[in-house]
Amino acid sequence: MHLAAPGMRLVSRVLQGTSRDIFSSPPERRLCPGSTEWELPDNNFSRSDNGNFQMPALAFNTWEIMDKVFNYSLFPYLQNGDNGRRVVRIEGESPCEIPGPGPGIYSFTELPHLAGTEQNLLLAKKIQTQWKKSGLDSAKLVHYDVLLSYPNETNANYISITDEHGNENSRKVRMRVHNINKITRIYNVIGTIRGSVEPDRYVILGGHRDSWVFGGIDPTSGASVLQEVVQSFGKLMSRGWRPRRTIIFASWDAEEFGLLGSTEWAEENVKSLQERSVAYINSDSSIEGNYTLRVDCTPLLYQLVYKLTKEISSPDDGFESKSLYESWLEKDPSSENKTLPRINKLGSGSDFEAYFQRLGIASGRVRYTKNRKTDNYSSYPMYHTIYETFELVENFYDPTFKKQLAVAQLRGALVYELADSIIIPFNIQDYAKSLENYATGIYSLSKKYDQQLRDHQVSFDSLFSAVKNFSKSASDFHRRLSQVDLNNPTAVRIMNDQLMFLERAFIDPLGLPGRPFYRHIIFAPSSHNKYAGESFPGIFDSIFDIENKADPRSAWKEVKKHISVAAFTIQAAAGTLKELL
Ligand SMILES: [Zn+2]
């Protein structure tokens, strides 16, 4: 792909500055003469060796307010004061109100989220114009009128304040909460490149552009990747290239309010998408750390990810002449097989959810991440806070923009290969291996209730039998695939359809218990952490905490039911791989 680090930096900065450009008259910024210093409450900041900061989550707000405080980032000014005090010190002329502890912070939370504002429409139009200029066949605005979510008074959100070790803090915090309870209009930007051979087959690259506050990392580090990938495909097209399949680019709105833009579009187009989608690649934040690559994807994509990361240069210090695959493998090997890098199960928490968990479209997400062994916190310390600024990325996370470049190259290459390879680059044998691992895993978990399994006659035999049948069908399928006549369009299309529809075969229209929109029987967001993935979620959840269930007989009956559902689904999926019924 034709992507360069300086381009990434520029696009990232321009994107984050976009709302600034569209205000007709910039608001005045008051400057204070002399030096200004704010002392920060104890323990509010600490710095780890790798330059990451720990900080309490402070405020939520909109992209729009960047206009008012764009240059007011706290970061360049954060210093260690005397006697270990942590202070923000600004020499010379400085903004009187900075987004930090102090009176200034309150005003930010009162401004509305970007969704539903005039500025948001202008921003969507700007992206639409850029995409058209890049040479896409079409770029449309698609709007929805939605009620942006707000806290439920009778079932308030739980806010956990933790220290740098991940321990919960019992201190009381006073919060000022501002909500707007009204229907607002949100805008997705949908761009397309029509496929030359199979225009009715879709590869989707989508990421959100709305953020809490400035969104320096989330989503700008991903939204800029989306812009760069669009431009790169535009360049290819200007040289006469056109993909075999249709590529759809999506800039989603209102992700932070509950994946609204991406889910609305998935629902509106559900019939076409489930009949025609080959894959969905997510383009949310491209960094959450700067240590190594992180991949979460369907097992169908493992081989493609290995292949492409071997072709991309590692952006890591000390790996100058090595591939992304090599640094990734060395820094984060898989716990099951040390000869391969780790790949995680898909959970949720971003826009791929409706596509993977609900519709069963093969999906994947890639980004740079922290060191999982030493950095024991979820997401990243500034996640969704006012401190997530462009300066945070430029000064601390990715000064050379090489990590974001590597992520852009990988996301772009995934889309390229999925859209342009004659045979869809999915590997079904990896799905078979994963199913074997997950079945063994859930069985081992159940063994701690060995006596109850016998008392209630719970058997995993049907599950293991279905997995075995699936493995056999997968091997047979791959043998036939290696012999397919690539010059016979019907034969190619038959195999490609089986590849495309395999993920769909794991969907149960009835959904998981109590979660009708999560319908994938093999994977679901964990019931205990929505961001993480869980395998065999139906069985897992029915066994979870089973010793404390009031009625053990019905609880074990439920376990048996979910083993049957999983066994049936895998057996049925194996059936779709056969040449004939
Ligand atoms: Zn995001």
Image (cartoon, grey):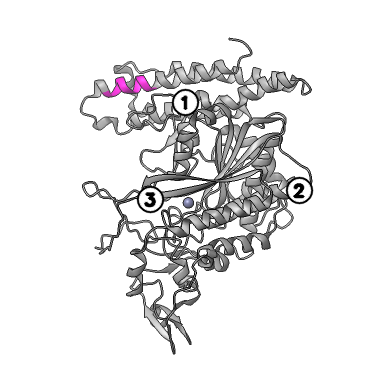
Residue 353 placed where, x, y %? Answer: 46, 39
Q: Residue at 38% of width from left, 78% of height from top?
A: 85
Q: Residue at 55% of width from left, 34% of height from top?
A: 298
**Amino acid at dot 1:** Ile
Whichever of callouts 3 and 1 sits on the residue coming sooner in the sequence is: 3
Q: Is residue 539 above or below residue 251?
A: above
- How crowded pointer 2 is (Cα within 10 Å; few <14, some 14-19, many 20+) is rated as few
The answer to whether residue 122 is left or right of residue 240 is: left
Q: Secondary structure at mark 2?
A: helix
Q: Which residue is mark 1?
A: 507
The answer to whether residue 281 is left or right of residue 540 is: right
User: Which region is colored magenta?
Assistant: 555-562
Q: Residue at 62% of width from left, 23% of height from top?
A: 497
Residue lying furthest bottom: 34
* Marks 3 and 2 close (CB-CB < 8 Å): no
Residue 184 is tagged as: 3
Q: Which residue is mark 2?
A: 238
**Amino acid at dot 2:** Ser
Q: Main secondary structure of the magenta part?
A: helix
